[in-house]
Image (cartoon, rainbow, N blue to C red):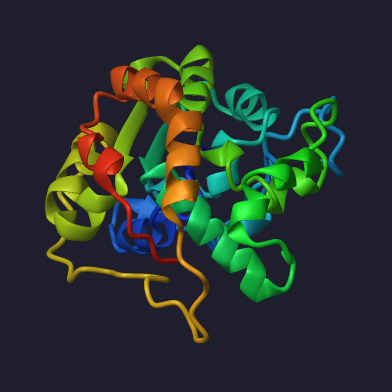
Amino acid sequence: MTIGMFVAGVQKCGTTSLFRYLAAHRDLQAPRRKELHLFDDETRDWSLRHHRLHDEAFEGEALGRIRFDATPIYVFWPPALDRIRAYNSEARLILIFRDPIERAYSHWSMEVRRGTEDLSFSASIREGRARLPADDPCHGSWRDKSFVERGFYGRQLARVLSHFPAQQVLALASEDLLHRHRAVLDRIAAFMGIAPFPMLDPVVEHLTPPAPPLAPVTSDDHDHLRGLYAADLARFAKLSGLDISGWRATRSYGA
């Protein structure tokens, strides 16, 4: 049985919490681990058909349940959507979004704590972008140095909608999942055509960064990024139908 639903993005926007909610629904079958990274795997020979590439990722038979994969990079990794469509053109995609400046800072903080980033946030969102080779969109640096680029949501959502019809795509806001999780779960159940979710306590993942605290976003950094994102955010708001007015006012960010 193929995977029928993908939480395909966006990184650092609440996909781990969403995975926990989805795994609790009786009509959905979660994989053995959250991020399967099947369709962004550049070691595979993608000239072959891979309609059973997921079998080892799930335990037991689906037994009428919808299998899902929650790998946030899929919306950002250029070849992934083509591969998902070839694998299952009827798949449903759930995308969850967060203020792109907040997301960029959270991503940068994660990489600093992992030891994979030694530039300041200010440098990483300016000259650090030169580390991403435009002629090689599958270069490894696009995975862990794409602090700014992953925030161009309008561009990414437009690409999704060029691969899948709008009725197969659900766009959500991370703040709604955090503060109004019941309403979000009701939307997902209706979108997937499944029974309502059981009563679930709020799930909060990765909101408390470990010590020591990192330098916050400066006003200059905020204004620089807001200028970069302005046109794309307008496009995103139109495509997604989400109210993002609160994002434009945000000036204090944590990981």
Residue 94 on image: x %, y %: 39, 38
Residue at x 80% of width, y 47% of height: 140
Image: 138 above or below 23: above
Residue at x 58% of width, y 57% of height: 35
Residue 130 on image: x %, y %: 78, 39
Image: 29 above or below 237: below
Q: Quadrant of residue 136?
A: top right
- Between 43 and 229, the one nearer to me in the picture: 229
Q: Quadrant of the N terminus?
A: top right
Image position of 56 (left or right of 103)? right
- Between 49 and 204, the one nearer to me in the picture: 204
Q: Residue furthest bottom?
A: 211
Residue 36 visible in the snapshot: no
Residue 88 on image: x %, y %: 55, 27
Q: Residue furthest front?
A: 220
- Between 152 and 204, the one nearer to me in the picture: 152
Residue 78 visible in the snapshot: yes
Image position of 70 (left or right of 197)? right
Residue 34 on image: x %, y %: 52, 61
Q: Quadrant of the C terminus?
A: bottom left
